[in-house]
Image: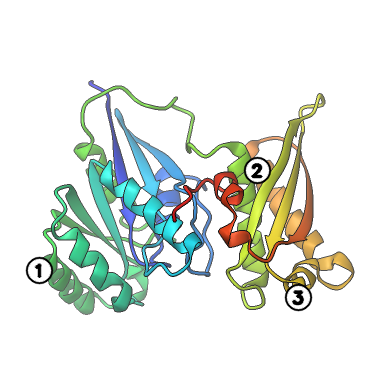
Amino acid sequence: MTEQCGLVAVIGAPNAGKSTLVNALVGQKVAITSAKAQTTRARLMGIALEGEAQIILADTPGIFAPKRRLDRAMVAAAWEGAQEADAILLVVDAVKLRRHELEPLLEILKDRPERKLLALNKVDASAKEPLLVLAQELTGKVQFEEVFFVAARTGDGVPQLKARLAQLMPEGPWHYPEDQVSDASERLLACEITREQLYQQLHDELPYDAAVRPESYTQRRDGSVEIRQQIVVARDSQKAIVLGKRGARIRAIGEASRKQLAEVLGQQVHLFLHVKVEEDWAEARDIYEEIGLDWVK
């Protein structure tokens, strides 16, 4: 059998379920998920295997109207992923359509030369009739080669989508070793996991203005790893929220992150977190490099 390998850009409106779908296609967690829109920042990739095919999934940040520099950097990363792709997979939340964000996306997609597939997500929470009407409407606007009805959270429809993506991959040697599931460095993945916990535990209280930057990542002689990270917020009031009463909240965030990191990395983890206030961190060039984004003017 000949090896195949290619890149699929996964795009969609914020919160369409792209990260959950990438994780389902890969078969394990490689991209962070959160109920907060724009959780994905870096162009984290998942690497899925199907038979002789290696499918590299560019889990692109949700594309939306960029206002701040951070937003612009995220959108640039998303389209960069799409421009190099062998196929583009548009993920649409079939329940909350978010048409104001979906329409501009369809507008751009209709003229793109790549093969385009549509994944209607969260179909387990929608009646069949409206789904078929929606599929017909969207394929009328963009020439999607195929439509897949999936529920990324439960895995429904995911094997069929994965099999089709594998067929579309061009012949060529695999880019990554068989056991590698992501191109994110472990330092970056560790920061993403902490940031996910930050949002999961504080999503109502903490605005989107927070970053987690890596400070050190040291392998200890006993086989464990020591990770030090800095949580950057824009105001003192946000620092108080992250710390919690007598440091209870940051301890809970650290504990949940440490457990998940130990699982992902397969080794014991010593995690040290501290909070720093930097008013204009979203305009600081060095933070972009540290969280895996390009600086966009």
Question: Which residue is the site of mark 1?
Answer: 140
Rounded to the nearest whole Å, what is the CA distance between mark 1 and mark 3? 49 Å
Q: Can residue 97 be seen in this view?
A: no
| Contact check, label 2 and label 3, Cβ < 8 Å | no
Image coordinates of residue 246 in percent, x first then y, are: 90, 69
Rounded to the nearest whole Å, what is the CA distance between mark 2 and mark 1? 44 Å
How packed is label 1: few (under 14 Cα within 10 Å), some, or many (20 or more)? Answer: few
Determine whether 194 is above or below 182 in the image. below
Image coordinates of residue 1 in percent, x first then y, are: 23, 20
Residue type at mark 2? Answer: Glu
Q: In which quarter of the image is residue 279?
A: bottom right
Image coordinates of residue 261 in percent, x first then y, are: 67, 45
Residue type at mark 1? Answer: Gly
Which residue shows up at 28% across the image and 78% down it?
127
Q: Which residue lies furthest to the front in this view?
A: 297
| Contact check, label 1 and label 3, Cβ < 8 Å | no
Quarter of the picture containing the C terminus is: bottom left
Secondary structure, mark 3, is helix
The foreground one among 52 and 270 is 270
Which residue shows up at 82% across the image and 26% down it?
222
Which residue shows up at 75% across the image and 37% down it?
268
Question: Which residue is the site of mark 2?
Answer: 263
Q: Is residue 124 visible?
A: yes
Question: Which residue is the site of mark 3?
Answer: 237
Residue 111 falls left or right of residue 265: left
Tell me which numbered mark, 1 or 3, is placed earlier along the sequence: 1
